[in-house]
Image (spheres, grey):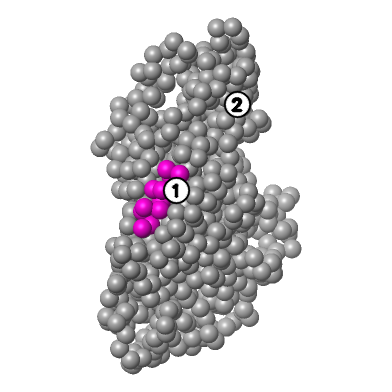
Amino acid sequence: MRRAALPVLALALGCATSTTRAPAPTPPPAAGPSAHRGDSAALLLSSNKLPPIPTDTGPLALRVVYPAAGDAIDVRDSSFLFGTAGSGKASLTINGAPVRVWPNGTWLAWLAMPPDSVMRFDLVARTTTDSATLSYQVPRTRRFVPPTAPVWLDSLSIYPRGRVWWPAGEWLTVGVRAAPGAEVLIRWPDGRTTPLVADPRPEEVPDAIRAFDHDTSRLVTPPSVTRYTGAVRGAAVGLPMGPAVGASAPSCPAPAGVGGCTPIAGDSAGPVIEAIYGIDTARARWPVQITLLDSTPQLIMLDDDTARTGKTDRMTVGRTRPGATYQWFFPTGTRAAVSGRIGNELRLALTRSSEAWVSVVDAVPLPVGLPALRATVGSVTLTPGSGYLTLRIPLSSRVPFQVVEDSRRLTLRLYGTATDVNWIRYGGTDSLISAMSADQPTTDETDLILDLSRPVWGYRTRWSGTDLLLDVRRPPPIQRAHPLAGRRIVVDPGHPPAGATGPSGFREAEANLAVALKLRDLLVQAGAEVIMTRSTDSAVDLYPRTRLADSVNAELLVSIHNNALPDGVEPWRNNGSSVFYNSPRSIPLAMAVQRALVQQLGLRDLGVGRGDLALVRPTWMPSILCEGLFMMIPDQEAALRSPAGQALYARAVFEGVQSFLLERGTM
Ligand SMILES: [Zn+2]
């Protein structure tokens, strides 16, 4: 897929900290030369096993590293800033609040955010002989601020907007934010109205808070008093736009962003949304152009490289709704029927009752009028090979499908199909497969179920004509006495491009590389063959990293990262070690490495988490992404700068990998 990874956040699973959490800290007081060290930050971090933080007593030099100059941040009441004071002997205040300075001169401040659109922070640093000041301005991300007028509506919140193709008989949900207590409606050009009603669901908790903040009271939000929703059906708006994929409407220039273009410029005859309160009315034109999908089926073929860059993974991702996480991975060539489009998100009908959303950029239209897909699943065969087994499924067309993985089972769900599997042929008796069966859970879905005698190690799918091939990987032979001997492991130092930065300005990409090189040495000493995705401080994109792991037939993929928190999440309470995975086959490896990280580093156990991250998405091997330490926490950044701290992290990952392989020992 062309899209970059989703942001590095995921729902933390099995968080082990909730019952053992240290008391909530107050902002840490300044620790000047004579300040006591019993503050909460020191208390929270005192149990770690990191090397001691070096002392720097250079001249005062105040610097804010984060947020970088000119960068806007999206914050509410509190957030963090970090940087250096130049000297570990400095005492520091920001807007009058004391901020702890660490022995190497770095600081991390959790502060009340001024309510202004450009926030001003006055930093004052002092030593016994010197002082320095810095006035630093940070803009807030622009947000809608309800006006004080008795009635208002936020025209930018109207949804959907841009170009929409929708079935005539299906309800389309419409939403807007408007003044509490108002009467809100859509007024059509012919005078009819459609009411939008108050929708008092709780305000959504920002993803960042949900994923990272352990203070569960922050997950409770008051009901919205400004959200109104309604639904319309069978309403075309503006000029007809032609088919949903391919030719676009002459009135609508090339879409910009998800919302699509601004339609029907100058057309005053479109629907208007009104908020009415007493004698006051606020109005905004509904910026939408809706074409009703007619009854002619529109089929498309998915291709994630319509721009012919050759740099994609030949998979189109599907989501359960626009903006949701990835649920399907459709290989190039998969066909499906279009059932709607909003902006640049295209809805595909997988079956009569299930649908997936993909990027319209990945859809190539097929001639209009082709009948809807309806494939028959014929007799499947299983062919054993040395490294993997291949299940060949003859189909009459390239229908969408999904592989669902359990610890010892692979279920291949084929959409828009009818089962005619009257013959399942095993190529000899293979000890990896304990049972194979076919099922038809609904009238147009077929499940092929493979039960394995061993935990799933990996699988991959590809088209061969209209036959779908599912390769099921054999687990590698692992010697219990030397679990790493002969194992082929890809080690991935995360970033550049991008990556976090620490208070002294140390880059995550450098930290990751140093740890990964030490990990490589440990693995090689134990007899493994290690392939690095990079071994210099050079930028490598995400997809070439996973492609390398696939192409060298890696048995494990281990990505090394160090973490950062999103704006607005309290850093002292929410930092620690964590490991991310994407599929069940990677959970035991993630758990083993997480246990070793917590044991070796002594930081808080943030648990393992499922993440939609590019580096844990390959299906051919167990793959994990380690977030050992936090770049933004001063003593953790200092540890990552030191060879001793890098070695500690590398040793932990090494031990975790080793104990995972030992559990899977076969000889
Ligand atoms: Zn990272």
Q: Which amino acid does label 2 sit on?
A: Val
* Callout 2 crowding tier (Cα within 10 Å): few <14, some 14–19, many ≥20: many
Residue 233 seen anywhere in this rendered image of the structure? no
Please tell me which residue is depicted at 33% across the width and 59% down the height of the picture: 660
Q: Is residue 323 above or below residue 122?
A: below
Judged left or right of residue 508, residue 252 is right
- Is 651 contained in the magenta span? yes
Q: Which residue lies furthest to the top in this view?
A: 129
- Count of numbered circles on the image: 2
Magenta-drawn segment: 647-658
Where does label 1 land, which residue? Answer: 650
Where does label 2 land, which residue? Answer: 64
Q: In which quarter of the image is the N terminus?
A: bottom right
Pointer 1 with pointer 2, Cβ within 8 A: no
x, y percent for residue 69: 66, 30
Q: Label 2's element?
A: strand
Q: Label 1's element?
A: helix
* Callout 1 crowding tier (Cα within 10 Å): few <14, some 14–19, many ≥20: many
x, y percent for residue 588: 33, 59
Question: Which secondary structure type mostly characterizes the magenta part of the structure?
Answer: helix
Tag nearer the camera, 1 or 2: 1
* C-alpha gap between disc 1 and disc 2: 30 Å
